[in-house]
Amino acid sequence: MPQELQPLIALLTKSGRPIRLLAWLQGSNSARLLGHLAATGRPLTHEILDELPPSHAECYVRSLLVRTHVLPKPEESLERITPWLARVLTDRPAGHARLVQPYTQWVLLRKARHRAARGRAVHRAGNRIRAEVLLIPSFLAWLDERKLSLTTVRQGHLEDWLAAGPGRRHDICTFLTWAFRRGLTGKQDITHAPAGNGPPPLTDEQRWSELRTCRNSGALTLRVRVARALTLLYGLSSERIRRLAVDDIKKRGDEIHLRLHRQELFIPPRLARLLRQLAEVAAEETLLPADDGAKLWLFPGIVPGQPLSAAGFSLLMRQSGFHAVPGRSAALVSLAEQLPAAVLAHLLEINIQTAHKRASYSQPNWSAYLAVRDQEDARPSRNTAPSE
């Protein structure tokens, strides 16, 4: 066994779930890839992993090696986009690569480097670039399936493509503008649909019915029941919920509290029992023990040491038939009826403007009424005789 893998071996042997560990070693593509890398005899580096085709196994192995300190945490760098792009385009048609490569280098990366020079977050820029780069080949493949090209595509075709997928498809607008300026396509118009105010909040009756379902339903998984209950009771965002750790559950005497960041929320007894059960399940599901300062997530993801991804959490909720936005809005409106906006913002650590907006739904605004009253008071009374 290579000496550099000894930290990984040491941590694996501490696993309290040997059956799960053996199943991973014998049946996982990630374990097979790790064995292949160890057998090559080459020193393991991020550059070696960058040479591999992008896949879940490659991502898993990289995270596992970082989690066990075999590899250092990768530095966020826009320079990692170029080798990643080469791997992504390996199996793509040559015509697609000839479009995606220059657009990525001279538009996306150039803009991101300018932003990085002004102190903007590099990792967010990298994530946006990757998302857009993956979108363009899917659009080009869609054109190929319909015997179309950038030259022959028309507005109606583009609208069909936009309507058939999620709203993020509108991000193709920048690419099409770039292609139009180079004479590769005709002028296309992509108008983003107005965001509006989103779906209306649940009614109080619907909200409490959903909470009773979370409390009593054996048809829902424990993860879904806890996530939905925290959304419906406290209006916590999906991002906040998926990043909760076992250590965030605090026992205060006979009460259970949930730590957010600086604040702690009291958790009612029935939900507290579900939280404790979820903490036990999370400890059983993790492959590696959390004895080296790493967080033990309440909603662990498939990548070692990471919580469930935003996309994975959203899918988990949708598959259970739950839409978080109406439920979260209803919870915040209900809390705003009982607490001033400033207190609500402080307690849940949300933006004060969000708290004021929710308060406006539940607390009457008398300004319009007072303005009318002022106008009425300024008029002479009908029962008063006019002065001579």
Image (tube, rainbow, N blue to C red):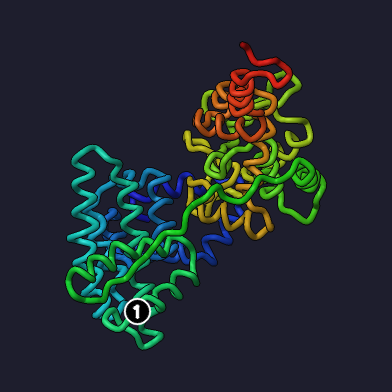
Q: Amino acid at mark 1?
A: Arg
Q: Position of residue 364 (x, y in %)?
A: 66, 28
Question: 57 above or below 376?
Answer: below
Q: Which quarter of the figure is the C terminus placed in?
A: top right
Camera-side residue of 62 and 366: 366
Q: Is residue 111 left or right of residue 289?
A: left
Q: Quadrant of residue 14?
A: top right
Farthest residue toward the bottom? Answer: 147
Total number of numbered labels? 1
Res. 19 visible in picture: no
SS of the residue under disc 1:
loop
Question: 102 above or below 285?
Answer: below
Binning the other alpha carbons within 10 Å of mark 1 as few (below 14), some (14 to 19) or many (20 upward) gives some
Residue at image location 68% in from the left, 58% down from the top: 321
Residue at image location 64% in from the left, 27% down from the top: 369
Farthest residue toward the front? Answer: 388
Question: 194 above or below 115?
Answer: below
Q: Quadrant of residue 128?
A: bottom left
Q: Position of residue 282 (x, y in %)?
A: 62, 45
Q: Position of residue 195 (x, y in %)?
A: 49, 52
Q: Position of residue 275 (x, y in %)?
A: 69, 38
Q: Which quarter of the figure is the N terminus placed in?
A: bottom left
Camera-side residue of 365 and 188: 365
Kindly identify which residue carries mark 1.
154
Residue at image location 60% in from the left, 29% down from the top: 368
Camera-side residue of 145 and 123: 145
Q: Is residue 328 left or right of residue 203?
A: left
